[in-house]
Image (tube, rainbow, N blue to C red):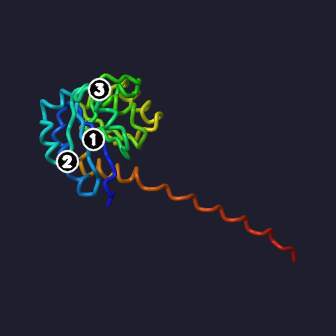
Amino acid sequence: MWDNEKVVLGVCGCLYAYKAADIASLLLRHGFDVHPVMTPSACSIIAPAVLEDLTNNSCPVEMFEGGPNQPYKTLATGAKVLLIAPASANTLAKIAHGMADDLISCSALACDCIKLVAPSMLQNMYNNPAVQDNLARLRELGYKVIPAGPDGHMAPPETVVEYLLNALEPQAPAAPVPPPPPPPVGY
């Protein structure tokens, strides 16, 4: 169990946004403190209130909700993991190129933690060289990319959470290299 470690769950506006509720539930079962954040377009698929009720945390959508205390500062503070699931092609491109014009992209730039993205889009979009370049750039920046299915859709919620848990596992130290065998002794 992860003793209330903070996970920021970014939800982008794509068809699989409704699966964010399943991801949040699974993370809660593992003992995480889940802080959802959504793009405005995600609200047309799943209501922020659903994630708020599940997580007992507010689910900001707009950049300047709450006045001078921008939500992305609060979201970034103390986060152990930033998980963007589902991640749209648009959000992936923004983050890969350092653009920050919504709460998720601002949070991605502000968080100093483990970062994972779970792409979800049409197969042709996912296979587009521009999207693949953006995913490669994110990997170079240290993001863990959870592979989409062959249809371009986000991996199942259980797989997404499994990737997150694996990303948190401490790296096992490398096994010591055994010394070379002694040279053969002459007769």
Q: Secondary structure at mark 3?
A: loop
Mark 2 touches mark 1? (CB < 8 Å): yes
* Amino acid beneath label 3: Pro
Q: Which residue is at a point 17% across and 45% down the rendered structure image?
A: 21
Q: Is residue 140 left or right of residue 43?
A: right
Q: Is residue 19 visible?
A: yes
Say whether disc 3 or disc 2 marks the residue closer to the N-terminus: 2
Say whether disc 2 or disc 1 marks the residue closer to the N-terminus: 1
Distance between the alpha carbons at the discs numbered 2 and 1: 10 Å
* Amino acid beneath label 2: Thr
Sort mark 3 into few (<14), some (14-19) or many (20+) by Cα contacts within 10 Å: few
Sort mark 2 into few (<14), some (14-19) or many (20+) by Cα contacts within 10 Å: many
Q: Which mark is residue 68?
A: 3
* Amino acid beneath label 1: Leu
Q: Is residue 80 left or right of residue 180?
A: left
Q: Which mark is residue 9?
A: 1
Q: Which picture quadrant has residue 114?
A: top left
Q: Position of residue 23 (x, y in %)?
A: 23, 47
Q: Is residue 89 visible?
A: no
**Quadrant of the snapshot with the C terminus:** bottom right
Q: Is residue 157 left or right of residue 186?
A: left
Q: 32 or 145, which is in the foreground?
A: 32
